Image (spheres, grey):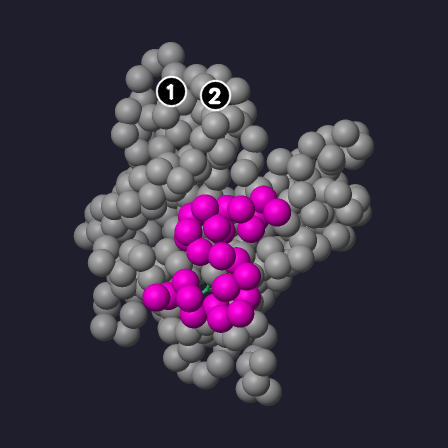
Amino acid sequence: MPESAVHVGSGKVRELYALDTDRLLLVASDRISTFDVVLPTEIPDKGRVLTGLSAFWFSRTQHLVPNHLLALRDDGRGTECRRLEMLPIECVVRGYLAGSGWKDYRATRAVCGHTLPAGLIESQRLPQPIFTPATKAQSGHDENIARDAAAELVGRTRFDEVERIALELYAFVSDHARARGIVLADTKLEFGVDDTGRLVLGDEAFTPDSSRFWPADAYEVGATPPSFDKQFVRDYCESLGWDKTDPGPELPEDVVTGTRARYVEAFERLTEMSFDDYLTDPSVVLT
Ligand code: Q0Z
């Protein structure tokens, strides 16, 4: 990393640097979180898998929306990107009833103002994907908000635009993933606006950290499907009877190895590229 990179932010598992007035560097670490706690053990190459996948999707969805990607670093974990004015909402699309969507549905039969058919069950595929915006919480959990509240935050015209684009992106990526044995249950996108006022897709996109990936062959309505990437970690943590408060447990070697293999498997199934080739030259995902 050049001397000039100034650290400007930390996520649970990522770091953000300023390169100059117009450019940022997003760095994905190998840290892993579960039950909202970052564990003391890293998953080797997890950050590279997520950086490569995100870049792959940026490259493949340019026909739908411009994005912030400028270049990948040779280390495979850094993304140089255009600095945007980020919209103050998380743009979540749900194709299946899981997580907070399932929780809200059970309580109210609605999710972010979308009233849904009665009698849906956990993990069920929705009649059609829905846009369910959330606030960006400074700490703790993002909170689902009504469509009108989101429209108030970004303006009605911009809201209609991000909803349409987010649904188009979800349709494109979920079809691609489903054809390769992975169900994209839901995903969180972040958009910004460039200096000309154009909507631009930013942050990370369609990674296992920003999306729920389920293995299609284990998908079952009425159950909580296993997470494609983190299930070994969750199962191990559950087996310990850990109370899910910080600090989390160290992971044993077999859980680390198995989890790394699942991340690499997700990368290879979705990109139809060899992860070793990505390590040799990250730009393969852009071609
Ligand atoms: C992304 C985040 C991370 C901490 C700001 N292209 C952009 N322009 C302006 N701002 C952002 C981006 Cl991607 C931006 N985040 C999220 C990422 C560490 C926070 F790696 N915050």
Query: Up-down: is 231 above or below 274?
Result: above
Q: Which mark is residue 220?
A: 2
* Residue projecting furthest to the top: 119
Give the residue pinned by disc 1.
109
Image quarter hosting the C terminus:
bottom left
Q: Position of residue 270 (x, y in %)?
A: 42, 48
Dot 2: what SS? loop
Q: How far is mark 1 from mark 2, CA to CA?
A: 21 Å
Front label number (1 vs 2): 2
Question: Which residue is drawn at the image coordinates 41% and 63% (left, top)?
Answer: 285
Up/down of 18 relative to 135, above or below: below
Relative depth, front residue between 259 and 194: 259
Q: Which residues are magenta?
A: 261-287
Question: Secondary structure of the magenta portion, mostly?
Answer: helix
In the displayed structure, would residue 151 be above or below residue 58? above
Of residues 77 and 22, the one nearer the viewer is 77
Q: Residues within 10 Å of mark 1 (few under 14, many from 20)?
A: some
Q: Which of the 4 quarters of the picture holds residue 237?
A: top right
Query: How far across and down, in percent of the image, does residue 11 sit?
Result: 58, 59
Left or right, 121 with reference to 47: left
Q: Residues within 10 Å of mark 2 (few under 14, many from 20)?
A: few
Percent across and percent down for residue 18 are 50, 77
Q: Position of residue 74 (x, y in %)?
A: 52, 75
Does the stretch in magenta take in 187?
A: no
Residue at screen point 55% across, 36% down: 227
Q: Is residue 273 a member of the stretch shown in magenta?
A: yes
Q: Is residue 133 visible?
A: no
Position of the N terminus, as image quadrant, is bottom right
In this view, the residue in front, 275 or 48, is 275
Task: Tell how many labels.
Answer: 2
Which amino acid is tagged 1?
Answer: Arg
